[in-house]
Amino acid sequence: MTESVATQLDLTLLLPRPQRVRRLGGNWALPKTVTLQADAGGSAGPAIDWLEQALQARGHVLERAGSAAERHLQLRVEPPLFGEPLPRHASDQGYTLTVSGGLVSVAASGARGVQDALATLSQLIRLAHGSLGQVELPCLSIEDWPDFPVRGVMLDVSRDKVPTMDTLYALVDRLAQWKVNQLQLYMEHTFAYSGHELVWKNASPFTAEDIRELDAYCAARQVELVPNQNSFGHMHRWLAHEPYRALAECPEGFAHAWNWTGEPYGLCATDPASLAFLEGLYDELLPNFQSRLFNVGLDETIDLGFGRSKAACEARGTERVYLDFLKEVHARVQRRGHVMAFWGDIIVKRPDLISELPRDAIALEWGYEAEHPFAEHLALFQRAGLDFYVCPGTSSWNSIAGRTDNAINNIARAAREGKAAGAAGLLMTDWGDNGHLQPLAVSYLGLLLGAGLSWNVSDAEHPSRLDVPRLLDTHAFFDSASLLGRVAYDLGNAYREAGSLRPNASVLFWSLIKPERLFVPAGVTPETLQSTLAYIERVTEPLPRARPLTAEGARVVEELGQARDLLCFACRLGIARSTLSKPDALAELSPALRAALAAELRELIERHRWLWARRNRPGGLDDSARRLEQTLKGLS
């Protein structure tokens, strides 16, 4: 292979992009058998498997026990030498990788750095030019380290998807190869707490054994599995039942925009029984994790002061009552040997109270719109001397196919402003509000960007320059035709075509699951819906020509096809309803049109159930499908 061909290897497609890369000139033709020599403790277990798989896919073989004289790959556990001093976390987690003189040499301070170096090397091999068994790597030197010490992902496993263990194992492997080092599973009612079967019996919850196995799997891949149990608001799955209802702020129910049933919503902050209840949950949940961090939630306490704590809130202030409850929760977390993390959305309403937060608590600043004021809020925690994470979102939920432009700009802003403020971590959130109707394939775009930008923030300065479709095809979809990434990217921008841009959702999503509401909002017309339908059909036209190399890629084709068809149905339903004098009265549609739309939706619901079962446990599926079945009922 000539020098000009070898240097065509596009290093911008590495994920995350390394901090420093220096070309040394020339190329190295890999031998058919690549021999490995590793220091004790430097093998980085699963990462060796990733490397072996990458070599096998290119027609080469890895031999794990080569002598010093015949080695082609050397792993050394020793402090890597960087061109300039780095922050402590960067030098601890960083690595150097050199390809030169027929040798790949890796140096890192520990197994984490070795693993990250091997992840990069595996990507270089996949991206390298050369025919089967004749791969050439460009000679180069890489100095690499993360900008954020913690690069995490939080999955919503409570609304309503509970992933199978196989789904989680595959995702952990993928995230670890993207250098993500923390995973949280957001729980409300999906852990099988003993004696609380009434709450979780239909949810297919995680058992203690499941969590211990997942924890060990994560640890072997240098990923910290962090316990997460909401502990204040969002407790309606518990409080809807006796005897838990007595713990509620509003035992008779609390009506709000997220609650279709009027169930009780949050715990009563002034009832000591609420804290005793939480202690029981913590004592059963926490021993299953190696991590000493614990996310207790405490977000969106929207009913606080509207029920049993009303008098206390009027006398002391709502945020003061909130802070007092937070301190009580913190004391119980601390007594159990853990560090408390909590969502910061409530306390930022009273900046004067932030200085009273426990000094070891970690504030999680979340915001999911492109213009969220991360810098303004982070400054409040920074001045108080607290550690904090910045928490953008994948923009997948309440959308069916995602909100691509919003996701990119939200994540990039979070990375830029989080790094500038000294955030200890970037935690990507992937929620499942209103039935978790979006497939996992839609979340990959945000998860991939979060991994890349939390490692190398410089890419967040000009996010429009990132070739997101190619990154998706290279690292998530493995599409040899390089089509799926562009389809996912463009389909995720259908929300813009429809107009009426709304926070945290797509208008097409609401039109699909809220048949009892007036459909056509300001700015959405039959013409915009018709143009949106044409846009969706145009950008997804290449989908059948995708050539995924893995079973996961084939599943992505199916999931993107379902997202496309749900959005097309939403457009057709909207166009039909916009002809009515009362657009929310589906019964006024002609019988023939109602029957046609009902048949289309019925098939989509069946496919939703089938696709769900391929990645997730059955619990929650009926609740999810019910969102679509309400619309079907209106058409029947």
Image (cartoon, helix red, strand yellow):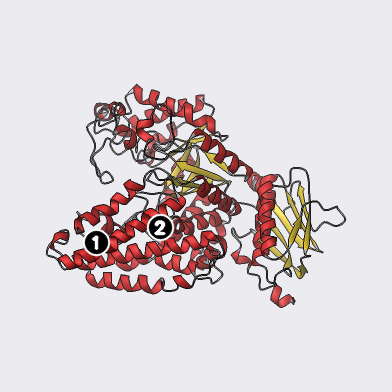
Residue picked out by circle 2: 370
**Image side of residue 129 versus residue 288, left or right:** right
Give the CA separation, mark 1 to mark 2.
36 Å
Q: Position of residue 203 (x, y in %)?
A: 38, 40
Q: Which residue is mark 1?
A: 598
Asked if the residue under mark 2 is in contact with the one under mark 1, i.e. CB atoms within 8 Å, the reply is no
Q: Secondary structure at mark 2?
A: loop
- Pointer 1: residues within 10 angstroms few (<14), some, or many (20+)? many
**Is 182 on the left or on the right of 316, as rendered?**
right
- Vertical comparison of 531 with 87: above or below: below
Q: 96 or 228: nearer the eye?
A: 228
User: Image height check: is 409 above or below 6?
Assistant: above
User: Which mark identifies residue 442?
Assistant: none
**Is there any visible trace of residue 112 in the rendered image?**
yes
Q: Is residue 83 at least partly visible in the picture?
A: no
- Residue 204 is situated, as x and y percent measured from the top left of the image, at 42, 40
Amino acid type, mark 1: Ala
Taking the spot 48% from the left edge, 57% from the top edge, the residue there is 444
Measured from the top left, where is residue 475 in percent x and y?
Answer: 56, 61
